Amino acid sequence: MPLSPDQIAEIEAARATPRLTLRAVSEGMEAQLYRAQPVLDHGFVRVIDYMGDDAAIVQAARVSYGAGTKHVQNDEGLIRYLMRHWHSTPFEMCEIKLHVKLPVFVARQWIRHRTANVNEYSARYSILDREFYIPAPDQLAAQSTVNNQGRGAVLAGEEAARVLALLKSDAGQMYDHYEAMLSQDGQQGLARELARMNLPMNIYTQWYWKVDLHNLFHFLRLRADAHAQYEIRVYAEAIARLVADWVPLAFHAFEDYRMGGATLSARAIDCVKRMLKGETVTQETSGMSKGEWREFQTLLD
């Protein structure tokens, strides 16, 4: 199960005892605080703590830039200005701490974002649960023939059944061996820090992950993108829904300028100007490589 009975009881107790505070709070995030959002088959994301809101971003920007922002008449306009012009420090004034349960192979991809504070469940001291990520049938796909780090057609029939059986049996057997190595029934038993090395990459781990909003937006821009690996993308999408409740003005600006927008090179801008003048532009006359031209055309379609 995503949450143990003890964790559920802890969450219910925390939400049942609200505390008065003088610090700014986000009503949207208060409604989400501590609650677990299920992800994949055994995973979840939940907010443990947060600092700041949309007003904190505005406050920091007006202190930092002073008279330079007085022409912006409202908070939303200022936040959009900051996002549009790639200002970062005002967004760093907001922070969030998440409790995440995720497969180990997703964690190893996630940890490449080195701009956060992380404390992971330690299998040196504790025994990992018998919980493994097993993909749903519609996520069992062959290797893409055009993308070395992507998926192709979904497996079907006997091939899909064969792969699922291998995933389940391999994970179960490795965990059986893990338990056997740890066993002290008539033997000394192997140290936990050594026994864990035999566990599969689809076993679940947990961590606390604390990050500021600027770096969280960078994470979401990459991992909530349609081209990101499905297993990390669903975590990013769950976090994005939380962020939308936490800092709605900042998140809408992020959606508009980062997720829904595009960055054009000087050559691409030149091509757009020429097209607007009625000139026919081809890859050969654009000054772009074939890859750049293909991406440029995708943006215009």
Image (cartoon, rainbow, N blue to C red):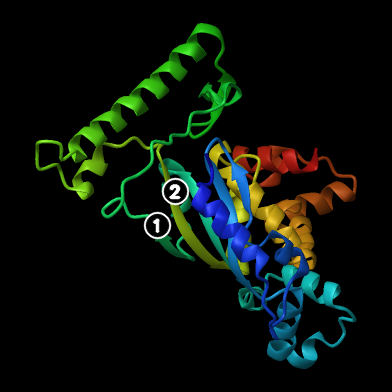
Quadrant where the C terminus lies? top right
Residue at horizontal 79 percent and vertical 92 percent from the top:
67
**Quadrant location of residue 96?**
bottom right
Q: Position of residue 18 (x, y in %)?
A: 68, 72
Q: CA distance from mark 1 to mark 2?
A: 10 Å
Q: Amino acid at mark 1?
A: Glu
Residue 103: give its label. Answer: none
Q: Say which of 235 and 20 sits in front.
A: 20
* Element carrying mark 2: helix
Q: Is residue 246 left or right of residue 179?
A: right
Is residue 94 depicted above or below 272 in this figure?
below
Q: Say which of 138 and 84 sits in front.
A: 138
Q: Amino acid at mark 2?
A: Ala
Mark toward the start of the polypeptide (1 vs 2): 2
Per the image, the residue denoted by label 2 is 107
**Quadrant location of residue 218?**
bottom right
Residue at horizontal 36 percent and vertical 21 percent from the top:
169
Tag in front: 1 or 2? 1
Residue at horizontal 71 percent and vertical 65 percent from the top:
29
Per the image, the residue denoted by label 1 is 120
Q: Is residue 15 left or right of residue 188?
A: right
Check disc 2: other Cα within 10 Å, few if <14, some if 14-19, many if 20+: some
Q: Residue furthest left?
A: 187
Is residue 230 depicted above or below 255 in this figure?
above
Q: Say which of 163 and 276 sits in front.
A: 163
The answer to whether mark 1 and mark 2 are in CB contact below 8 A is: yes
